Image (cartoon, rainbow, N blue to C red):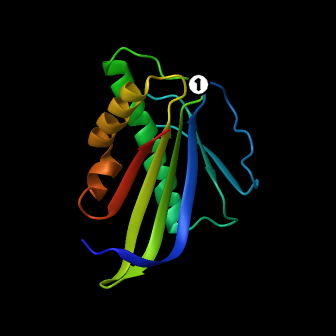
Amino acid sequence: MSKIEKVLVTGKSHTTAVDRVGVSPNHDDRLNLTLSGPGTPERKLEAALPHPTAEQLFAGAWSACYISALGVIAKQKRVELPRDLAVDVEVDLGLGDTGFLLQARLTVSIPGFDRALAEEIAHAADQICPYSKATRGNIDVALTVK
């Protein structure tokens, strides 16, 4: 797989599970969306640019899907995820030796959970998330659990 040699733009998203209606503003008040998936509670997407880039929208859609996958896995394991659960996704568009490429970083925060259990849930969610499946083997993806 080709590697990015020069990053041109990075799309970032921060998605949290929210139990209430409404969305609090993000750090620069430029894009806040309340997202939902089939049969899931609302999710909050915060993005950083005045007009979202394709990378930012992809990061937001991926993070919303992935946080739903975390919920599915937690339910299967009969554990309750914390209210302050968060997923940050960064998608880079860059240049490599084969032209334009994408790469991504997912950072999962499951406060209050045993690290081993948090990592188990995060990696299991990565196996069932359709966005993770679609990118697997096609772009470089790093998954980190905080």
Up the image or down, 7 lies above or below 21; here it is below
Instruction: Please name the residue shown 73% across and 39% down the image.
Output: 24
Q: Residues within 10 Å of mark 1 (few under 14, many from 20)?
A: few
Most distant residue in the top direction: 78
Tell me the residue that label 1 is attached to. 83
Q: Residue at the location (75% across, 45% down)? A: 25
Image quadrant assignment for residue 10: bottom right
Left/right placement of residue 111 relative to residue 23 reads left
Residue 139 coordinates in the image, percent (x, y): 31, 64
**Residue lying at 76% horizontally and 55% vertically, measured from the top left:** 28
Residue at x 33% of width, y 31% of height? 120
Left or right of residue 121: residue 1: left
Amino acid type of disc 1?
Arg
Instruction: In this rendered view, identify the residue nearer to me: 52 or 120.
Output: 120
Residue 72 shows in this picture: no
Examine the image and state in which quarter residue 137 appears: bottom left
**From the viewer's perspective, is 85 left or right of 134?**
right
Observer-nearest of 2 and 42: 2
SS for tag 1? loop
Q: Quadrant of the N terminus?
A: bottom left
| Residue 15 screen position, x and y as percent | 56, 42
| Quarter occupied by residue 111 | top right
User: Considering only vertical position in the picture, is 105 above or below 95?
Assistant: above
- Relative to 53, does residue 122 appear above or below in the rendering? above
x and y, in percent, of residue 60 in the image = 51, 52
Q: Residue furthest front?
A: 115
| Depicted 126 relative to depicted 6: above or below | above
Who is closer to the viewer here, 16 or 108? Answer: 108
Query: Is residue 93 shown to the viewer in this render?
Result: yes
Q: Left of 2 or right of it: where is 19?
A: right
Q: In this view of the protein, which residue sits in the foreground, 121 or 30? A: 121
